[in-house]
């Protein structure tokens, strides 16, 4: 499906806008601080309940009127349409699909798989394990239906066990081991399965982006013993019992190795940005092949992130996947070579956005 239209009220500096998009690539041109990225944030909120710039919806609401509303209409190749909506005021948030209330953000995310690429995306390579776990969780959620329930149950039990550990209630902490072990082992299996399915797509893109083919990707489970149940029990047998659970898939990671060293330490910033782009494009190819479901790309300042050759490669791949993209730039000249007759361009200035004809 692709985003046919987007309406927002009280989104950062915007009082109101109503936009109709191309199913191809939509460019937003304007000076820094004009509000281009806010439009990308609105799409992100519809998919994830937060934006890549803020985890709180209150932070992206208009300062003078915090009653935030975001509404979109999506359409597939057959013409079928789905409406997604989010309303937020103070601490109350309502989610709607086809104007009917839903309780979980995952319901919206299933309709709108969004991949964000922005100036901090290279932290997927250089940042801590949490960045790569989010990458794994996003991909696994979209291709494996059983993942969400296991993930939810695992984190519910993890929270309870950690609470017990902080209060030194060892017997009560052990009560949560069966739920943690069962769901943790399943998540570990799904993560490992996902990265194994993803690696061939990554290798294709390493070649297309002319990155070293010696780069290797190793999944680290987050526990060392023969089973998670063994490691959980071993943790309680230590002389100094920890106050948080230190083993399990919430500690998993992807190790990225180049010439027997960590890629983050031996690569340039440019290589890191290109590899981050390749990893996210690989996710889209896998999702497209698995479910015939295109992603929506949100790319903040693409010309600033990649050189012209890599920009052209990335957009060719996105178009080849029949994916829709929203791309910001401070300069029309920097993106003219990437436009097609099917593209749309918008000018953003001081809280106003107008289509450029």
Image: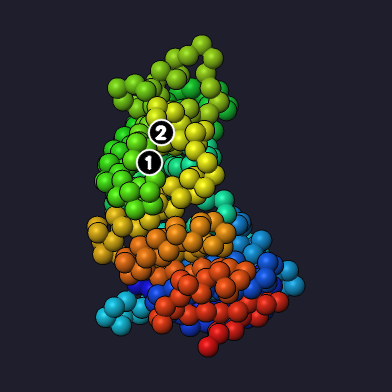
| Residue 19 seen anywhere in this rendered image of the structure | yes
Label 2: element kind: strand
Disc 2 to disc 1, C-alpha distance: 8 Å
Q: Which image quadrant: the N terminus?
A: bottom left
Q: Residues within 10 Å of mark 1 (few under 14, many from 20)?
A: some
Q: Residue furthest top?
A: 239
Residue 82 relative to residue 262: left or right: left
Q: Which mark is residue 137?
A: none
| Residue 137 makes an appearance in the image | no
Residue behind mark 1: 212
For the residues bearing labels 2 and 1, Cβ distance under 8 angstroms? yes
Which comes sooner in the sequence, label 2 or label 1?
Answer: 1
Q: Residues within 10 Å of mark 2 (few under 14, many from 20)?
A: some
Identified at 45% across, 23% down, the residue is 171
Q: Position of residue 286 (x, y in %)?
A: 29, 55
> Residue 69, image x and y in percent?
58, 74
Question: Which residue is label 2 attached to?
Answer: 258
Q: Is residue 127 above or below residue 145?
A: above
Identify which residue, 170 or 14, lies in the foreground: 14
State whether residue 340 is above or below residue 114. Answer: below
Q: Viewed as shown, does residue 355 lie left or right of 313? A: right
Q: Furthest residue to the bottom?
A: 357
Say which of marks 2 and 1 sits in front.
Answer: 1
- Percent x, y of residue 197: 26, 46
């Amino acid at each position: 499906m692709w985003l046919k239209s987007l309406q927002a009220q009280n989104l950062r500096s915007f009082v109101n806008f109503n936009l109709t998009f191309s199913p191809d690539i939509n460019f937003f041109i304007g000076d820094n601080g004009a509000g281009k990225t806010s439009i990308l944030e609105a799409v992100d909120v519809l998919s994830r309940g937060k934006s890549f710039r803020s985890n709180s919806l209150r932070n992206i609401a208009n300062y003078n009127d915090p009653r935030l509303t975001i509404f979109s209409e999506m359409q597939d190749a057959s013409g079928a349409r789905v409406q997604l909506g989010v309303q937020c005021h103070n601490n109350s948030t309502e989610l709607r699909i086809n104007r009917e209330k839903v309780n979980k953000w995952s319901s919206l995310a299933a309709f709108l798989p969004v991949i964000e690429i922005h100036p901090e995306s290279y932290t997927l390579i250089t940042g801590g394990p949490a960045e790569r776990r989010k990458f794994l969780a996003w991909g696994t959620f979209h291709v494996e239906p059983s993942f969400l329930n296991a993930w939810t149950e695992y984190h519910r039990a993890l929270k309870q066990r950690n609470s017990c550990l902080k209060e030194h209630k060892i017997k009560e902490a052990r009560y949560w081991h069966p739920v943690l072990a069962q769901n943790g082992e399943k998540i570990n299996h799904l993560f490992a399965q996902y990265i194994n399915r993803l690696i061939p797509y990554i290798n294709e893109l390493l070649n297309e982006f002319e990155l070293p083919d010696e780069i290797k990707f190793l999944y680290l489970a987050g526990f060392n013993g023969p089973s998670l149940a063994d490691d959980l029990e071993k943790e309680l047998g230590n002389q100094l019992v920890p106050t948080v659970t230190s083993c399990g898939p919430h500690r998993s990671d992807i190790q990225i190795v180049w010439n027997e060293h960590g890629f983050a330490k031996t690569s340039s910033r440019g290589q890191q940005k290109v590899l981050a782009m390749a990893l996210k494009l690989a996710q889209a190819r896998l999702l497209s092949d698995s479910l015939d479901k295109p992603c929506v790309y949100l790319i903040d300042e693409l010309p600033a992130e990649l050189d012209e050759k890599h920009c052209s490669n990335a957009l060719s791949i996105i178009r080849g996947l029949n994916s829709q993209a929203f791309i910001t730039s401070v300069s029309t000249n920097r993106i003219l070579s990437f436009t097609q007759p099917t593209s749309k361009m918008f000018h953003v200035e001081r809280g106003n956005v107008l289509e450029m004809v």
